[in-house]
Every structure is written in structure tokens, then in C-alpha cells.
Image (spheres, rainbow, N blue to C red):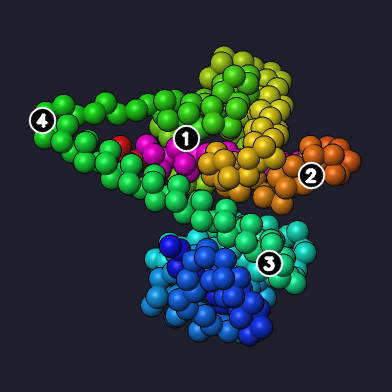
Amino acid sequence: MLTFGIVDDDAASILMLKSIIEKSWIGEVIVTAENGSEGERAVLESNPDVLLIDLLMPDQDGIETIKNLKQQGYNGKYVMISQIENKEMIGKAYQAGIEFYIQKPINRVEVQAVLSKVNEQWKISRYLNEMKDSMAKLSNLSTDLGNSPKKQTAREIIQPILRDMGIVGEIGSRDIVEIMEYLIHHTKAETLPPLKELYEVAAHAHNDTGKEGKAVEQRIRRTVMSAFSNLANIGLTDYSNPKFEHYAPLYFDFQDIRLKMKEMDGKLKPEKGKVNIKKFLQVLYLEVLDKWRAQ
């Protein structure tokens, strides 16, 4: 059963959330606090699986508290609670590492639905970690027997990620792969150079000149938009799909994904979608780099 922590400066909200969690048999609340700094200390001591945290608190807001907890090694899942509807603030919360967002005033049905998703995510993460441990043991056994596993190329690492997002067959994916291979083999930095430079890298890889850099930009933009739409469609069909849960909040602004889902469901008028190309490439690069270094 999951263990929960609740940090909220409203005592009534804490009591309501605790009641919903425990009466619904979702888990057990093992720690509560009414401000960020107190919550930070309490969470580090009790180490709950999931932390429900208010966005706005007087001494230390939820985003700052999350950043501090991450720096100190707390690896639980985060769910933000707030009455704030500001898109930019919510976006910052997702960037800080929250998994889901619960809107105040607290609604029992919404809390149960969100925390059920968190529970599923936690089970998947635990399963994946167990798989990683098993694979590591097999890898060590293989090494002991003199059969060292073959190191994957950057391209082999990238392809499954693009496949998961449904864009491996897109023309722009070719450009993205060229860019990722260049970054892996020719730079040690973890931050991207200017996008224009990356577009030129892809153009040069295909011996293209002239206006090809602009064409590369357009191909990549169309490809990233396809990934955005594909993930929104997956989420609309199955909100707990592991691909959706992993890629949607990591590569895109999750609020934009949710708006796209509402648009697909006919609840909003279609609008020209916007995506952050640099964020997409930055996240992809860090994910590929992490897997490359882990070999």
C-alpha cells in the first residue's frame, strides 16, 4: 500500500485529503505539515511514496519545497494542489517534477481518480526497477562468463523512444537522429547549442546546402507536432498508458497536452498547436545521454 505525505497551510484541506486517501483504501498518510520548511524536514524523515503539496504557502512555496527535496535525495512522486489556474505557474510546477495537479476546492472524485493514476504509476515504476535489477544481474553474470554485452549505438538508443511516440517513420526523425548522434559524439555539455546550429548539423549530415537549414527546422517541427498529437491521442484513449505517462509531461507542457485532448474529444474548438522544439530536443538528448552513459 502506498504511503502519503501532505503539506498544505490549510488544516481543513489536510484533514479532507487524509480522509479521502484512507477511506478509499488508496494508501496511508504517514506525515502532514502546514508549511513548506516544516514539510521538507518531515518528508525527509518519513520518506513517503507520494507527496501531496500545496502550490502557494506563506513561508516556502510548493515549487521551492519540491526543488529542495529533490536536491536532498527524496525520490517520491509529487502531486500539486492549488486553486491557482495560472497556466505559467502550473507549467513551472510540472517542470519542477510534479506528476499530477489537483484543483481546489478539493473534490473527492477528482482526488480518488488522480491518486489511482499515481498508484498505477508507482506500480509500473516498481516493476521497471525490478526489471532493471534483474537485467543488471544478468549483465553481471554475462560479464563474469566472459560475454560482455554489446554497447548500443546512439541511434539504437534513440529509435525506441521515437517509436514509442509514434514518429519513427516521420521524415523529421531522420534529422533528429542526426542531431542526437552529433551531440552524443561531439559535445560533453548537457545543454543544447542554438537551434540554428543544430539544424545546420542535420543539413550538413545529408550534404544539403542553401536553404536546407530552414527545411530541417520545418521537418522537425512537423515531427514534434506529430508526437504531441500522438501522445494526446494515447492519453485520451488510455490515461494510464505508460507511454503517455512517461513522455507527455516530460517532453511537453502537460497543460497543453490536456487542452489538445479536450480538443480531440470535441470539448474545445481546434486551434493551431504550439510546441517547444528546444525543450523537446533537450529532454530527448538528456534521456539518450543518460542511457548512453549507463551502458
Which residue is denoted by mark 4 in the rendering? 145
**Dot 3 alpha-carbon crowd within 10 angstroms: few under 14, some 14 to 19, many 20 or more:** some
The answer to whether any part of residue 217 appears in the image is no
- Mark 4–mark 2 distance (CA, rounded to whole Å): 54 Å
Which residue is denoted by mark 1 in the rendering? 183
Which residue is denoted by mark 2 in the rendering? 262
Q: Amino acid at mark 4?
A: Leu
Q: Upstream in the sequence, badge 3 or badge 2?
A: 3
Quadrant of image for the C terminus? top left
Discs 4/2, front: 2
Q: Is residue 81 above or below residue 40?
A: above
- Mark 1–mark 2 distance (CA, rounded to whole Å): 36 Å
Q: Residue at x 53, y 19 (%)?
A: 205
Q: Which residues are magenta?
A: 274-292
Front in this rendered view, residue 147 or 151:
147
**Dot 4 alpha-carbon crowd within 10 angstroms: few under 14, some 14 to 19, many 20 or more:** few
Look at the numbered discs 1 and 2 and tell me whether their residues touch, using CB distance below 8 Å.
no
Compared across the picture, whether 204 is left or right of 227 comes to left
Discs 1/2, front: 2
Q: Upstream in the sequence, badge 1 or badge 2?
A: 1
Q: Amino acid at mark 1?
A: Leu
- Mark 3–mark 4 distance (CA, rounded to whole Å): 55 Å
Q: Upstream in the sequence, badge 3 or badge 4?
A: 3
Q: Secondary structure at mark 2?
A: helix
Look at the numbered discs 1 and 4 and tell me whether their residues touch, using CB distance below 8 Å.
no
The answer to whether any part of residue 254 appears in the image is yes
Q: Secondary structure at mark 3?
A: helix
